[in-house]
Amino acid sequence: MKKKKAGPKTKNKSKSKTKEKKGLKQKKKAKAKIVEIKKIKIKKDEKKQVVKRKKITEPLNKYWKEVIFKDPEMRKWAVRQIGEHVIEVINKMDYELSDEEIAKRAELKPSDVRVVLNRLHAHGLAYYTRKRDKKSGWYNYIWSLLPQEAKEFYEGFKKIKQEVKQQTQQQQELYYSIVNGEKKIYTFEEAFNNNFICPISGKPLKYLEKKEVEQNTEQKAQEEEKEKPKKN
C-alpha cells in the first residue's frame, strides 16, 4: 500500500500548532519577567518605607524600670493617670518603636497602646515623629520615651509628696515619747491603738503642740538638705 502524502492542509495545521506552542512559551517567559520585576519593586519600596531610628547608648526605659516603677506611690499614680497598661507599654519601649510594634511586643490592642502613648505625650514624658507612606497615604508614628524629662518629673513628684506629708503632719493630732534622747512621734491612730502608751519605752504618750510640729518639720527639711550631695 502506498502512503498518502501530507496535503497542504495538514502541513498548515502542524505549523500553526508549533507557532501556538512558541507563543505560549513566550507569554510564560514574559509573565515570569513581570513577576520578578514586581518583586524587585516591592523590595525597594519596603526598604524606602523603613524609618531611620536614632542610635541609643542605653535603653530609653531604663530609669522607669530601675527607679520610677520601684516606687509604689509612683506606680499607683502612673496606672491611675496614664492607664492600666502603662507598665506593660513602657517596659517594651527600650528604643524607638511604632505604636503597632509596641502593641505586638506587649501583646496588647493597638488602641490600648495609643491611649497610654497619648497620655505620656500629654505629660511631656514621650514624643513622636511621623512619616507618610507614599503608597497607602497613611502616617507612620514612631514613639520614644524621654529619660531626662522622666527624671525631672519624678523629682518633682517626690517634692510634692514630701510637702503633702508635712501638711498632714501639721494638721493631724500627734503624740510623742522620748526614746534614747529623741522624740518618737505617733499619729492619733497609732497612739489610740497602743492605748496612748509608747510601745518602745512603755511610758505614757504626750500630746505634741502645733508649734513643736512646725519646728520638727523645719528641722527635718534642713537635715534632708544637708544630706543631699553637693553639685560640683
Image: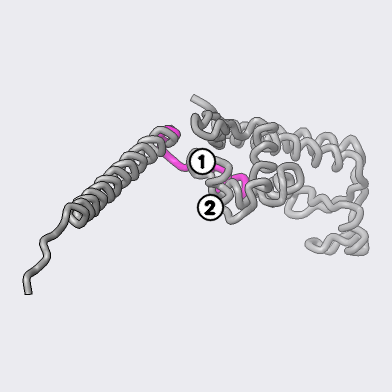
Residue situated furthest bottom in the rendering? 1
Instruction: Decide if residue 110 is on the left or right side of residue 104.
Output: right
Q: Name the secondary structure under disc 2.
A: helix
Q: Mark 2 points at which residue?
A: 105
User: Residue 215: x, y in percent?
Assistant: 82, 35
Q: Distance between the residues labelled 1 and 2?
A: 10 Å
- Figure check: 33 above or below 135: below
The residue nearer to you, when weighing 177 against 223, is 223
Query: Dot 1: what SS?
Result: strand
Amino acid residing under circle 2? Arg
Query: Which residue is depicted at the point 89% across and 55% down?
Result: 205
Q: Residue at x 91, y 38 (%)?
A: 210
Q: Choose between 142 and 123: the one closer to the eye.
A: 142
Image location of residue 229, percent across then percent down: 55, 33
Of residues 129 and 223, the one nearer the viewer is 129
Q: Mark 1 vs mark 2: which is more N-terminal? A: 1
Q: Do the residues labelled 1 and 2 touch (CB within 8 Å)?
A: yes
Q: What stretch is highlighted in magenta?
A: 51-69
- Kindly identify which numbered label has been placed on residue 97: 1
Point out the image quarter for the N terminus. Answer: bottom left
Residue farthest top in this picture: 232
How are the colours assigned in the image?
one colour
Count up the numbered dots. Answer: 2
Residue 197 in the image: state x and y as whole percent. Answer: 88, 61
**Residue 112 position in % (x across, y down):** 68, 48
**Residue found farthest to the front:** 1
| Magenta stretch, overall SS | loop
